[in-house]
Structures are given as C-alpha cells and as structure tokens.
Image: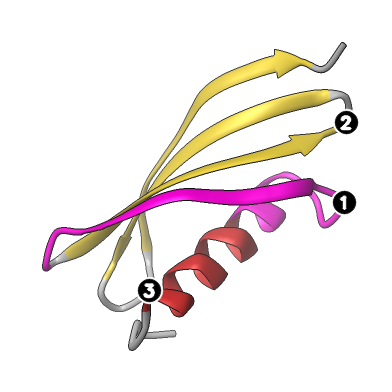
Amino acid sequence: MSIEKIKDVKLIAENNIKDMYDDTITNFTVNSIVNNSDRYDVSTEFDYIGYHYTVYLSIDTDGNITKFSQIAKTKIE
C-alpha cells in the first residue's frame, strides 16, 4: 500500500502493530507523525494484555515498515 494521505500512515501503523502483537490491542493512539520526505516517523501507544506500550515506527513512502522500536512497556495497575 503506497501512502497518499496521512490517514494511510495511521492505518499502516495500526495494522502492523496488530500483526506484531494481536488484534485485541486496545486504546491505540498515534501521538505524532513526522514527514521526512522519504519516510514517516510514527509514535504510537496502545494497551495489550495488562501492559501499556509505546512503539515507534518508520514507514517509507511505499508503505513498508523500515524500523520498529518498542520504547516502553509499563504494567497497567
């Protein structure tokens, strides 16, 4: 899927995270999307099985994930 709109970036990020974790993630949020002309850097947060995750992704203009970093994992109390 190539990127035509910022909405495409959000959809690619969410679908990739669901592929990596599970479709049962909740509270998925995109905190920021930075357009670097050749890629989009995306900061996301979501909840999954009792933990809150922060994940950064880089997505190229063709819609491919070029970088995936789980930055934080915090137990939900």
Query: Which quadrant is home to the N terminus?
Result: bottom left
Residue 39 x, y percent position in the rendering: 21, 62
Neighbour tally class for label 1: few under 14, some 14-19, many 20 plus, Cα within 10 Å: few
Residue 68 x, y percent position in the rendering: 43, 42
Would you say 12 lies left or right of 75 here? left
Would you say 28 lies left or right of 64 here? right
Q: Does 17 appear above or below 40?
A: above
Please give the name of the residue rendered at 43% of the width and 70% of the height, measured from the top-left corner. Answer: 9
What kind of element bears circle 3? loop
Identify residue type, mark 3.
Gly
Residue where numbered disc 2 is placed: 49
Identify residue type, mark 1.
Thr
Lower position in the chain sequence, tag 2 or tag 1: 1
Residue 14 x, y percent position in the rendering: 61, 60
Please give the name of the residue rendered at 78% of the width and 23% of the height, measured from the top-left corner. Answer: 51
Q: Are marks 2 and 1 in contact (CB under 8 Å)?
A: yes
Would you say 17 lies left or right of 5 here? right
What kind of element bears circle 1? loop
Identify residue type, mark 2.
Ile
Bounds of the magenta segment: 17-37
Neighbour tally class for label 3: few under 14, some 14-19, many 20 plus, Cα within 10 Å: some
Q: How many marks?
A: 3
Lower position in the chain sequence, tag 3 or tag 1: 1
Residue where numbered disc 3 is placed: 63
What kind of element bears circle 2? loop
The answer to whether residue 71 is magenta is no
